[in-house]
Amino acid sequence: MDILVVGGGASGMMAAISAAKLGANVTIFEKNDRVGKKILSTGNGKCNLTNLNMDLSMYNSDDRDKLRYCLNAFSEKDTLDIFGQLGLMLKNKKGYIYPLSEQASVVLDVLRHMLDVLGVNIKTGMDVKDIIAGNGFDVITDGSKHHFDKVILACGSYAGFDDKKRKNVNSYDLAKKMGHSIIPVLPALVQVVCAEEYYKSISGVRCDATVTLYNENGAVGRERGELQITDYGLSGIVVFQLSSEISRRLERHEELNLVIDLLPEFDEDSFESFISGRIKSYLGENVESFFLGMIHKKLSALIMRLCSLKPTDIVDKANAGDLYKACIMMKTFTASVSSTKGFENAQVCTGGVPLTEVNEKLESLYQKGIYLCGEMLNVDGKCGGYNLQWAWTSGCIAGSFAAADGK
C-alpha cells in the first residue's frame, strides 16, 4: 500500500507514523523546507501536547457526534501512551501536558526520529497542484507526476499566513476538486481589534477578568482568565478563547461587544456592599485615592475620565451619579469589536471541510481513498492543548484506516 500524506505538520506526521506502523509505504510531501515547523511555536515554544480535562465543550465543529466518536477513538490517554512509546518524558501541569523539558523542539525531534525509524520518505519543497483519481491517484506537483494508492490531506490552514502566503495555499482547492464544500475559513485563537480610540492610553495592562461576548440578542460566550490590553484592543487567553466565536459572528455581520468584569471576585450583592463601605471609608478623601488599589492605575484613570470625574474631586462632594457610574464600569467595562488581528496572527483557524463530509474513518464521502485530518477539517479547539489533541486524534485515525482499508 503506497500512501501519500500531503502536509508534514502535527496531524500529517501522526498520520504517516500510524500508517507506517501498519506496514504501508508512506511518503510525506511537505511544501516548506522541513516538516513540523509550526509545532516549534506551540504553547509559547513549550508545546502543550494535550489536556487531561478533555471535554467536547472545548471544541467547535459542525458534527459534534462524529467529533465525540473521534476523540473517544483516540483520546488524550492514547496521546500520552504514544508519546511515551516514542520516548518522550512528559509533565502534568494541572491537566495541561507538556514535554518534561518544556521544549517544543523535543516533540518534533521524537516525531522525526520515529518517521525515520519507520522508513517514511519525507520530501520537502513539494507543492501539490492536483490530485487525479483513477486506479489509485496521480498526484501532480511542479513538473512531475506521482502515483499512490491512497492520499491523506493534512495540509493545514491559513493560520500564521499573511495575504501573500495565503494566495499560494491550495489545500482547500484540492478538497473542492474531490467534491467537498468549505465552511468559511476564519482566524481563531487570535487578538481582537476594538473601535474605541483610548486603547493606547491603557496599553500594557494585564489583569484577571471575566469577559462576556454579547451580540444584539444577549450574551453568547463567557470566559475568565488573563486579559491583556494592547494599543489596538484586547488580547490574552480570555480573548483567545472567545475569538473563534467572534470570527464566525463577524462573518455574519453581527454587532459584537465584549463586556469586561475587572473585579470578577465580587458578585453583584457583595460588590454593592463593598462599594458602599468603601465610600464611607473614603469620605473627605479624593477620588483618585478612592480607586487606588482596586484596579490597574491606567484603567482607573481612564474610567474617571470617561465618567467626568477628576482625580482631585472629593468623594463626598463629587457627583454621586458619576461616582456610581465609575464603580459600575469596573464590572461592566465595554469594548466594541471591530475585527480580529487576522490570519497572520492566528494560531489556528475555524472552518474548513465539514466533518459531516467524511465518515468515522475520516475518509471522504465523495472520493474513496482520500482521507482528511487536522486543520483541513472544521474542528477548532480552545487554548490548552486541544488543537494538538485534534491533530494527534485525526492523524492517527486517518493514517490507521488508510493503511488498513483494502488490505
Image: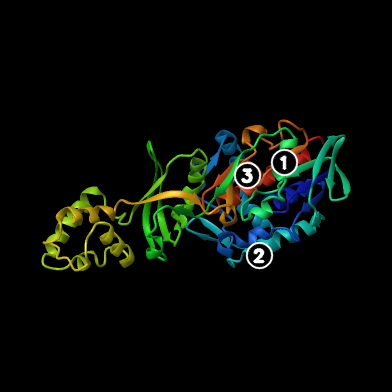
Give the Cα separation between the discs numbered 1 and 3: 28 Å
**At x 74% / y 41%, what residue is drawn?**
174
**Residues at discs 1 and 3 in contact (Cβ within 8 Å):** no
Q: Which residue is mark 3?
A: 74
Residue 388 horizontal/vertical position (percent): 60, 52
**Residues at discs 3 and 2 in contact (Cβ within 8 Å):** no
Left or right of residue 91, residue 115 in this image: right
Q: Which mark is residue 286?
A: none
Q: Which residue is mark 1?
A: 173
**At x 69% / y 58%, what residue is drawn?**
36
Foreground: disc 1 or disc 3: 1
Quadrant in which the C terminus is drawn: top right
Residue 287 horizontal/vertical position (percent): 19, 65
Report helix, strand or loop for mark 1: helix
> Mark 2 Cα within 10 Å, few/some/many (few <14, many 20+)?
some
Q: Which residue is mark 2?
A: 106
Left or right of residue 367, residue 300 in this image: left
Q: Nearer the viewer, residue 294 or 396?
A: 294
Residue 57 horizontal/vertical position (percent): 49, 42
Q: Nearer the viewer, residue 83 or 188?
A: 188
